[in-house]
Structure formats: C-alpha cells, structure tokens
Amino acid sequence: MKESMRKIGKVLGITLAVYVCLRWLLPLVIPFFMAFLLAKLLNPLVEKLEEKLRWKRGFWSALLVGILFLVLGFLLFLFLGTLLMQIRTVVDNMDGYKQQAGDFFRECCCQVEVFTGIRAETIEDNVQKQLPGLMQHMKTNVVPRLMNGTISYAKSMFVWVGICFVIIISTVLILKDYRKIRVSLEHHPIGQIGLKVCRRTYEAGGAYIKAQLIIMLIITAVCVVGLYLSGNEYALLTGCGIGVCDAMPFLGTGTIFVPWAIIEMMQGKYMLAAIYTVIYTICSILREILEPKLIGNKLGMHPLSVIVSIYVGLGIYGLWGFALGPLSYILIREIYLTI
C-alpha cells in the first residue's frame, strides 16, 4: 500500500509540475526552445563549413541563420502579397458576386417552394424585410468587434516581430557555442535528465508531425481524385486546400464539404451533393482509422491514450491542447521513468 501510494504521489507531483510548466512557463521560454531546435538542425552544416573553409564558427552561424530567416520572410511576403491581391480582386468584383448571390438566393427560394409549397416571392419579401435590421445589427455590434479585433491583431503582429527577433539572436548565440552548451548539459545531472527527456520528446514530436503529414497527404489525394471524378476543373487546387484544412483541428473536411453539398442540393444538383457527401465520409473514416494507428504507434502510446490525452488537453489548454495534451502525457511518462 505504501509503495502504491508513493507511486501515485509521484505521478501526481510530476503531472502538476508538467501542467504548471506548460501552462505558464512554456510561453516564456518557447522562443529559446525554438532557437535551440534550430541550432540543433543547423549545427551539422555549420561544423562542415567550419571544417572545410576554416572560417570562424560565429560567422557561419550568423550567415546561415540570416539566410534561413530571409527565405522564410520572403515566402511570408509572397503569401501575404498573394492574399492581398485576392482580397482586392474580390472587392473589385463585388457587384458581380452580389448578382450571383441574388441569383443563388432566388434559386434556393424556388427549391424551398418545391419542397414546402411556400411561394418563392413570399420568402424573398420576408427576407428583404429582415435585411435592414440585420444590417443595423452588424453596424452596431459586428463592425466594432472587427475593428477592435484588427487593433489587437496589429498589436500581436508587433509582438510576433519581437519574438522572431529574439529567436534569431538566440539561435546565433546558441549555434556559436553549441558544443560548449551541449557538453555542459551532458556533464550536469539535471542537464542529463533534461536532455534525455527532451530527446525522447523531440523524437515523439517529430513522429507526430510525420504522422499528420502522411494523413494529410492521403486525405488530399482522396479529395483530388474525388473532385476530379466529379468533373471539378479546380480539383487539384481545391483538393490541396481541403487537405490543409483537414490537418487543422478546428477545421476539417466537413467545414468545406458539408456546406458545399447543401448548396449543391439546394440548386438541384443531387449527384454532386451525393459525391461530396461520399468524399467527406471517406475522409472522415480514413482519419478516424489512421490517426490513432499512426500516431499511437509512433509515440509508443496506445490509440486510446492518444484520444484521451487530446480530449483532456483540449479541456485544459483549449485549442492548443490538441498538441499539448499528447506532449504532457509524454513528458509525464518520460520524467516518471527517468527519475
């Protein structure tokens, strides 16, 4: 009984420590964790360049980190530029979109008339009567919230720029003295435990990302093939977009396919609606089968443990619990087995 109580107390103590660290300490130290991870990835290349060209390690560290972040910044610039161009295109063609929306709404009213017997003109009149109140509600409630959200997003952008600057400087400094830092940690008792736990967590995290990429590629392939067979001329582009959405825990294929199938059904295109429903069903079944299997095997966790850790993580950490839940489980297990 004493031994069992001791083990339970040990698990509870480790669980509390992991929760406190991930809840409050992780946001403060995550830039330095990212910097150490980047330094670990770039260190082999820096050592090869230092050995062959005989230049100082600090120079190669600053050069490689600068090139890496310049490339990432350029890709981000292209992405934001493309996004702004698409937004501008939508604004320029707003009149045409309004016309298409009106035509679609009239078609929906006609379909409702077929199913319910209510005249389409009656439905249109009732909706038009409600539009002024809806527009007033948006002006008084929705627009101010969007403006406040825009201000907060602008502040967040400055914060992210500062975090990126900290990561760049920290990566250069860690990479410059990477061998000394590594030797110091390996010869310190606490550092040895920390390196062992971090190494296992890093391996599991890499396996988790690989498993998610495999699932995303399979879901994308199913979507592309299904849309191509349905006659969609943008099957590749749309399928890739839906595959990316499926990898996000707060979106998924249903976010795209369910409204799409409903719209097609309301337009009388029952075959397309059925095809989109079938594609969504296949994607959902594949994710339900592959996710516990791949992630569970890679993490050394039972599939039920994966589901439970994700569910508990979402309840404790919120949206980030999708990743922090399994991470907490791994940390608790590895710390328990190490100390």
Image (cartoon, rainbow, N blue to C red):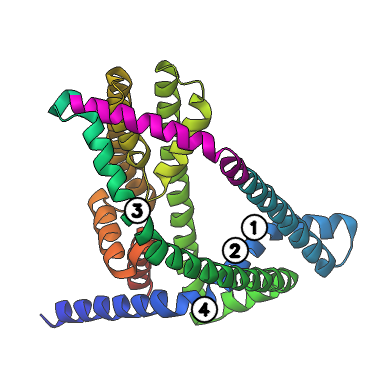
- Examine the structure image and report whether residue 22 is included in the region drawn in magenta: no
**What span is colored magenta in the figure?**
86-113
Q: Earlier in the sequence, mark 3 or mark 1?
A: 1
Q: Nearer the viewer, residue 209 or 69?
A: 69
Closest to the camera, between mark 2 and mark 4, is: 4
| Element carrying mark 3 | helix
Give the number of the mark in front: 4 or 1. 4
Q: CA distance from mark 2 to mark 4?
A: 16 Å
Q: Which residue is mark 1?
A: 41
Contact (Cβ within 8 Å) of mark 3 with mark 1? no
Query: Nearer the N terminus, badge 4 or badge 3?
Result: 4
2 and 4 marks in contact (CB < 8 Å): no
> Of marks 4 and 1, which one's residue comes earlier in the chain?
4
Q: Helix, strand, or loop for circle 2?
A: helix
| Residue 131 in the figure: left or right of residue 235 | left
In three-dimensional space, the C-alpha distance between marks 3 and 1, rounded to whole angstroms, equals 58 Å
Q: Amino acid at mark 3?
A: Pro
How packed mark 1 is, by other alpha carbons closer than 10 Å (few <14, some 14-19, many 20 or more), is: few
Kind of residue indicated by mark 2: Leu
Q: Measure the alpha-carbon separation of dots 3 and 2.
A: 55 Å
Disc 2 target residue: 37
Q: Earlier in the sequence, mark 2 or mark 4?
A: 4
**Residue 196 visible at all:** no
**Residue 322 percent across, percent down from the top left:** 36, 58
Q: Which mark is residue 234?
A: none
Q: Which residue is mark 4?
A: 28
Q: Is residue 6 above or below residue 65?
A: below
User: Residue furthest toward the left?
Assistant: 1
User: Mark 3 = which residue?
Assistant: 132
Above or below 233: residue 125? below
